[in-house]
Image (cartoon, grey):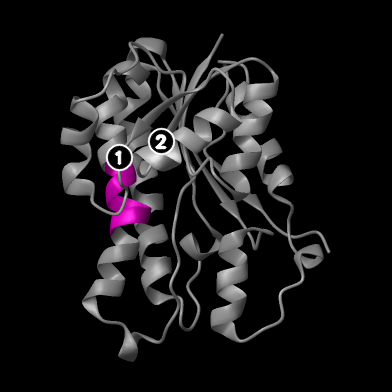
Amino acid sequence: MATHLITGAGSGIGAAVARRLHERGDELILLARDAGRAKELAAEYEGARTLVADLADPDRISKALGMQPMPDRLDSLLHIAGIVDLGPIVELRPRTWHQQLNANLISPAELTRLFLPQLRAAQGHVVFVNSGAGLQAHAEWGAYAASKHGLKALADSLRYEEHGNGVRVTSVYPGRTASPMQVKVHSQEGKEYDPARWIAPESVATTILTALDLPRDAEINDLTVRPGR
């Protein structure tokens, strides 16, 4: 039975992935930002373990996890959590930059560093759920796109560094996906939100599981997913 550590399992793509893995009997370790959220996730996914660490504060992740039981091995680390806050560069204050860089880039880097021993032990898989903004930046997406461009660089470097240890690394670049994040984006853009126009989280989950389940003789490095409508 494979063991997966998932961030962002509370909604959207993360919830879709957690459901699929839970249904097939894999072991889940779900990262929550606080004890209350951990309790909710544990109730939703029977038998799942939880860890508490706040991705908004990467400097404290190591200390937080150091006080909790850690797995001996890890078959996958799935970085799915993320935040977005749009705005033109001329209006973005350092706080907005720090928030998105912390949650979308620095915390995934720190979690990966901390769990690499367990991933190496299992010859596991690191999956970064990136974004189309990680490949091309548009107006008012500067801070978010910068965090996601950085996430691509993190994944590419990690792939080269860990290839000899048998650790696979995949970046997934979804287009607009029907999720709470997309609701916020439409609100900031001043547009009406119609989930039927965008990719279902379950469809992105299918691409992630495809990468995870690929036989060991192959590796999906980069996978781009776009709305089909």
Q: Residue at x 29, y 54 (%)?
A: 56
- Which image quadrant: the C terminus? bottom right
Q: Is residue 126 visible?
A: no
Most common SS among magenta residues: helix
Q: Quadrant of residue 52?
A: top left
Is 113 on the left-hand or right-hand side of 34? Answer: left
- Which amino acid, by three-letter code, is at mark 1? Ala
Q: What is the spatial separation of the Cα atoms under label 1 and label 2, in whole angstroms?
A: 7 Å
Is 206 on the left-hand or right-hand side of 73? Answer: right
Q: Is residue 176 above or below residue 4?
A: below
User: Is residue 156 magenta-colored?
Assistant: no
Q: Is residue 150 above or below residue 208?
A: below
User: Which of these two is toward me, 72 or 227?
Assistant: 72
Percent of width and height locating residue 72: 33, 11
Q: Is residue 45 above or below residue 33?
A: above
User: Which of these two is toward me, 71 or 203?
Assistant: 71
Q: Which residue is mark 2?
A: 31
User: Which of these two is toward me, 26 or 123?
Assistant: 26
Q: Residues within 10 Å of mark 1 (few under 14, many from 20)?
A: many
Q: Which mark is residue 130?
A: none
SS at mark 1 in the image: loop
- Which image quadrant: the N terminus? top right
Q: Residues within 10 Å of mark 2 (few under 14, many from 20)?
A: many
Please provide the residue range marked out in magenta: 102-109
- Does the residue at mark 1 contact the one at mark 2 (Cβ under 8 Å)? yes
- Which amino acid, by three-letter code, is at mark 2? Leu
User: Is residue 107 magenta-colored?
Assistant: yes
Q: Quadrant of residue 177?
A: bottom right
Q: Which residue is mark 1?
A: 53
Q: Is residue 116 visible?
A: yes
Q: Residue at x 40, y 87 (%)?
A: 88
Percent of width and height locating residue 13: 61, 46
